[in-house]
Image (cartoon, rainbow, N blue to C red):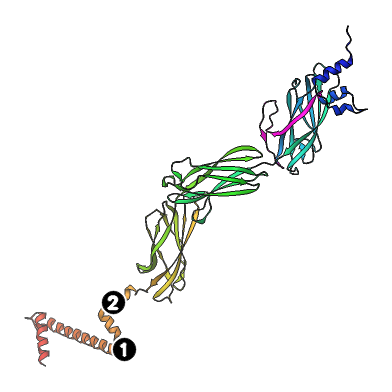
């Protein structure tokens, strides 16, 4: 059997790989065999990145992580630069401060395995489950990786390779989009139908990495909701924990009153050198408008009772439900405030009259008085609203009905001096008594037969003639 010189074998290996000359040129340094074994006999670090946690050799998506993200997956890419295939690969990662193996006590090693044969020159990935703690800092970090492996067809104790694994915590952008209507100065997620409303979109970066080249697009899926203002904006950058407000104007048809609607928002941006696109749906409620006005306020007597009267008009485009009205102030006019009155639903464009009986203060005379009313109603969402009405009304006391209906004779008598009234009454009484006495005497004479041929009327007439001659 031919014996091959070791020098020839070394020459053949050296021709296959490049060995740093400085590594073995120095006297007393490692042998050429040691250098080949150290540099090219097994797995070598190639790359690392954060990913979604797919524990396989399939392609994965790189992700950004930020302090406090918690459970994450660090992918470490290695390459087999040895002279033979390797298998039985297990990696143990010693983590720096701010990181911890998921589900293990602090200080424990993160472990990952690769259960396939890795041919010479091929790459493979170890996936380590790592918690990114709140104390982790943004920037570069280094972990120590120890890899146990076996050469193909080799038995005995596994080989080991140790190396540094650099990785980076970049921070990440967290995009939040919201929309509010600022109609009538009140910010809400409602749009009033039938009128042009101001609407603001807020794009906020709640993360720890800035975003650049931001493009925001607003779309209305409904034909009944129109965007009348801007619908696309370009923003140079939005820093971490910053917000940009984008104003526009919108219009919703009356047919949508009482119904929900939505806007679709698309945000395109770049972060940590990667392009991203996120979509959001902003829900809104299409509300009707209720605008109540009180008019023709006055004080009228109804059935002899004074009432505060007037009318309410809903100038909006939807009904005001469960409407009530009450007097909250009428100083110097009423002795006590009347109770609240329920007047029902107030339809749009339809006046509703009201009358509130009041107890007028006994010292109140004719004049102008200030009154205050409170109108309460509910909208389509059963939310209560209040309307305060302040006005002035004219008041004139009404003369009682029994005094105005007395006869003129009694009224004239009541206006005479006391003495004249008494004398007149006595004279009338005397005449009445005398006439009654004469009629009685004549009746007795007639009944006694003194005037048999005459009837009672003739006797009376005859007697009256005699008296006149006397």
Residue 343 image point, x, y percent: 41, 57
Comparing 369 with 45, the one in front is 45
Image position, residue 439 (x, y; %): 17, 83
First in sequence: mark 2 vs mark 1 = 2
Q: Residues within 10 Å of mark 1 (few under 14, many from 20)?
A: few
The residue at the far top in this view is 1
**356 or 110: which is nearer to us?**
110
Q: Which residues are magenta?
A: 40-68
The image quadrant of residue 65 is top right
Decide if residue 438 is on the left or right side of residue 281: left
Q: CA distance from mark 2 to mark 1?
A: 20 Å
Residue lying at 10% horizontally and 89% vertically, measured from the top left: 466
In the image shown, does 345 or 196 lie closer to the viewer?
196
The numbered mark at residue 418 is 1
Residue at x-position 70% and y-position 25%: 57
As for residue 54 lying within the magenta part, the answer is yes
Residue at image position (64%, 45%) is 206
Q: Residue furthest bottom?
A: 470
Q: Quadrant of residue 117?
A: top right
Residue at the farthest right position: 28
Q: Can the viewer see residue 219?
A: yes
- Residue 406 is labelled as 2
Query: Label 1's element?
Result: helix
Secondary structure found at label 2? loop
Q: In the rendered view, does 67 fall on the left or right side of 213? A: right
Q: Quadrant of residue 142?
A: top right
Mark count:
2
Picture layout, residue 129 above or below residue 377:
above
| Circle nearer the viewer, 2 or 1 | 2
Q: Is residue 25 magenta?
A: no
């Amino acid at each position: 059997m031919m014996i091959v010189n070791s020098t020839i074998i070394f020459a053949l290996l050296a021709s296959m790989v490049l060995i740093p000359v400085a590594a073995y040129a120095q006297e007393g340094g490692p042998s050429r065999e040691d250098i080949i074994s150290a540099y090219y006999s097994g797995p070598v670090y190639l790359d690392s990145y954060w990913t979604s946690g797919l524990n396989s050799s399939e392609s994965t998506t790189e992700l950004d992580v930020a302090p406090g993200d918690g459970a994450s997956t660090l992918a470490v890419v290695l390459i087999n630069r040895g002279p033979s295939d390797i298998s039985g690969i297990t990696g143990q990662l010693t983590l720096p401060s701010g990181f911890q193996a998921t589900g293990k006590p602090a200080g424990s090693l993160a472990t990952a395995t690769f259960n396939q044969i890795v041919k010479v020159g091929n790459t493979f990935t170890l996936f380590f489950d790592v918690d990114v703690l709140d104390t982790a800092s943004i920037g570069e970090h280094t972990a120590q990786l120890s890899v146990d492996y076996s050469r193909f067809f080799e038995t005995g104790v596994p080989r080991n390779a140790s190396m540094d694994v650099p990785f980076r915590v970049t921070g990440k952008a967290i995009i939040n989009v919201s929309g509010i209507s600022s109609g009538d100065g009140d910010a809400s997620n409602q749009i009033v139908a039938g009128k042009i409303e101001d609407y603001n979109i807020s794009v906020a970066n709640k993360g720890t990495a800035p975003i650049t080249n931001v493009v925001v697009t607003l779309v209305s899926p409904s034909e009944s909701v129109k965007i009348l203002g801007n619908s696309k904006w370009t923003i140079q950058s939005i820093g971490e924990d910053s917000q940009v407000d984008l104003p526009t104007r919108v219009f919703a048809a009356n047919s949508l009153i009482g119904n929900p609607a939505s806007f679709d928002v698309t945000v395109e941006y770049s972060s940590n050198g990667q392009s991203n696109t996120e979509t959001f749906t902003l829900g809104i409620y299409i509300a009707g408008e209720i605008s109540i006005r009180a008019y023709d306020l006055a004080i009228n007597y109804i059935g002899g009772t004074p009432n505060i009267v007037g009318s309410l008009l809903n100038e909006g485009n939807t009904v005001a439900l469960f409407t009530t009205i009450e007097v909250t102030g009428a100083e110097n006019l009423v002795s006590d405030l009347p109770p609240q009155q329920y007047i029902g639903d107030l339809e749009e464009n339809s006046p509703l009259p009201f009358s509130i009986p009041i107890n007028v203060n006994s010292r109140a005379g004719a004049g102008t008085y200030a009154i205050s009313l409170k109108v309460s109603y509910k909208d389509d969402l059963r939310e209560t609203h209040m309307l305060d009405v302040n006005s002035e009304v004219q008041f004139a006391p009404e003369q009682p009905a029994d005094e105005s209906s007395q006869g003129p004779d009694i009224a004239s008598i009541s206006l005479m001096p006391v003495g004249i009234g008494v004398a007149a009454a006595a004279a009338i009484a005397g005449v009445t008594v005398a006439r009654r006495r004469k009629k009685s005497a004549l009746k007795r004479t007639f009944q006694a037969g003194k005037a048999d041929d005459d009837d009672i009327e003739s006797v009376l007439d005859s007697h009256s003639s005699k008296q006149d001659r006397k």
